[in-house]
Structure formats: C-alpha cells, structure tokens
Image (cartoon, helix red, strand yellow):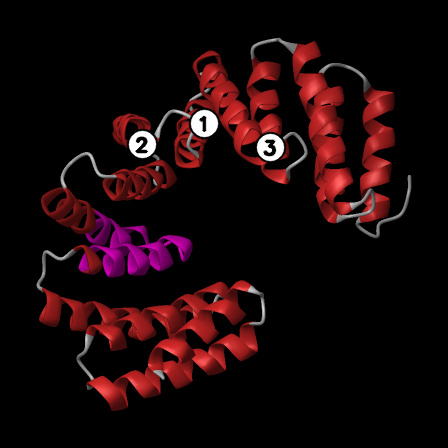
Amino acid sequence: MWEELNKKAVDLFQSGKYPEALEAAKQALDEAEKSYGPDDPRVARSLNNLAEMYRAQVKYTEAEPLWKRALEIRERTLGREHPDVATSLNNLAGAYFEQGRFDDAEPLLKRALRILEKSLGPDHPDVAASLNNLAALNRAVGKYPLAKPLYERAIAIQESALGPDHLEVGTSLNNLGALYQLLGRHAEAVPLLERAADIAEKNFGPYHPHLATSLSNLAESLTAVGSYKEAEKLLLRSQQIMETNFGSDHPYAAVGLENLADFYEGTGKTVEAQALRSRAEQIRGGKEH
C-alpha cells in the first residue's frame, strides 16, 4: 500500500500535478508511519518526498522540519555515515542555499561530502555531485579559488566513471565555465563551454532548449574574446531553437531577443538592437517604442 501511494505521489509530481501529488505524498507518509512505525527508513523517504514537493512550491517553512526529521531517522536507523544520510544533508543544504542561508548550508555540504567519500569511495559519481554542490556554494559567496578545484575534481570523476560525453560532465563543464566568466577569464571558459555545448547536442539533438542555453553561454565568452561572428551565429541559432520549441511569442523568445539586443548594442549595431528590444517588449506585454 505504501509503495503504491509513494509511486503515485512521485508520478503526479513529475506530471506537474502538484496539489494531487502533495495529497498523495501525505497519504504515503501516514501509511508508512502506521505500517512501519515512526522511525522506519521508509518514513524518512516519505518525509523527503513530501519536503521536495513543498520545495518545488517554494514553501521552505513547511519543508524544513520534514527534511530534519528524515535526517534524524536516517542517522538513528542507518548510522551517521550512511549514504542516505548524505542525501538528506544535501537536500537540506540545497534548501538553505536557495534561501541564501549559506552559513547554514556549508557545514551540511562538507559533512555530506565526507560521508560519501568514506562510504562510496573518492571516485564515485555521487561524490562528484556533492563536490559540485560545495563548489556552487563557494562560488555564490565569492570564494572562487575554493570553487575551482572542486569543479575540476568533479569533472575528472565524472569523465572516468560516466564517460566523457555524459550529461553530468556537460553540467560540470558549464559550471566551471561560468566560474571563469565571473572571473573575466573568458579565453579559458571558451573551450569548456564549447565542449559542454557539444555534449548537449550529442545527448539532446540539435533542437533542444538545453542546447540553446549552452550556445548562449558560449556566445557570451566568444563575444568577450572578440569572436563576434561566431558569437552572433550561436545567438541566432539559440534563438531559432527556442522559437521552434516554444513559439515566437513565448517569454523564452523574449529572453533570447534581449540577449541578441545586448550583443548588437555592444558591437555598435544600435538600430538592430532597438528593433529586437521592441519585439521583446511586445512579447512581455510592453509597448513598442
């Protein structure tokens, strides 16, 4: 019964039916507590699922006590060094990160990383994911020198464990490329972002929104190093992908138009930039100049 309710909740959530998913998740939690007792790992799993659903609706006040209770159950029943404990720590830290509570998130992320290294080994993909989390926090608080080696180690683990063209490798390459962009080191960002875009195209195909985002990221650094023709080509292709997927009047199309307008303004093409901004404003419901 619990497994059916739990699966139903997850399926509804993945289908975007949040109110129904939330109700099913609450039922699954009640069933787990009644059937297995309040300290069973399956209760912790239900608590975690319910918390994630609240998180998706930005209801952190409701989610936080659920994550904390799930963590306590896992520590008590599985031991403080179990990988599931690290999962709970990463989940709670992720919520703190999203709220800007970086000081609260940091010790949880560091502990999660230590647990995973000890329990799964230093070269496990889950360790790479944890490294990415800790790197993102360091990047967010401006500790760029601390973030860089974490991203680099994550990439090395993922390439070895998952293969050089895996999506997680592409994500980590994008993360490191974004760090270099923040540092103004665009020449070093370009090859990372080029490879990330190539991985996105191999995995998703030439017309996927994920690829459009990668192309736009790459265009930013190409512009910064003076490769204007290549940057323009990528921005136009990114825009075409977004309009193909979402239509020419979608807010995503407006974002792409504004990116193009910024590019044209930066290269002195003010007439083209103004026309693109007018289109973007019309899409967003503004008035044409």
Residue position for label 2: 158
Number of the label disc, if any, that sits on residue 211: 3
Q: Amino acid at mark 3?
A: Leu
- Foreground pick, 126 / 248: 126
The answer to which of marks 2 and 1 sits earlier in the sequence is 2
Q: Is residue 75 left or right of residue 283?
A: left
> For this view, does 41 lie left or right of residue 93?
left
Residue 89 shown in magenta = yes
The three-letter code of the residue at mark 2 reads: Gln
- Residue 6 has which mark? none
User: What span is in magenta?
Assistant: 85-109
Residue 223 % position (x, y) = 62, 16
Identify the image quadrant of the N terminus: bottom left
- Front one among 144 and 27: 27
Which element carries disc 3, helix, strand or loop? helix
Q: Nearer the viewer, residue 206 or 144?
A: 206
Q: Majority secondary structure of the magenta segment?
A: helix
Q: Secondary structure at mark 1?
A: helix
Which residue in the structure is indicated by mark 1?
Answer: 182
Q: Nearer the viewer, mark 1 or mark 3?
A: 3
The nearer-to-camera label among 2 and 1 is 2
- In this rendering, is residue 100 above or below 224? below
Judged from this view, the residue extending furthest toward the bottom is 34
Point 73% across, 14% down: residue? 267
- The residue lying at 17 percent from left, 68 percent from top is 74
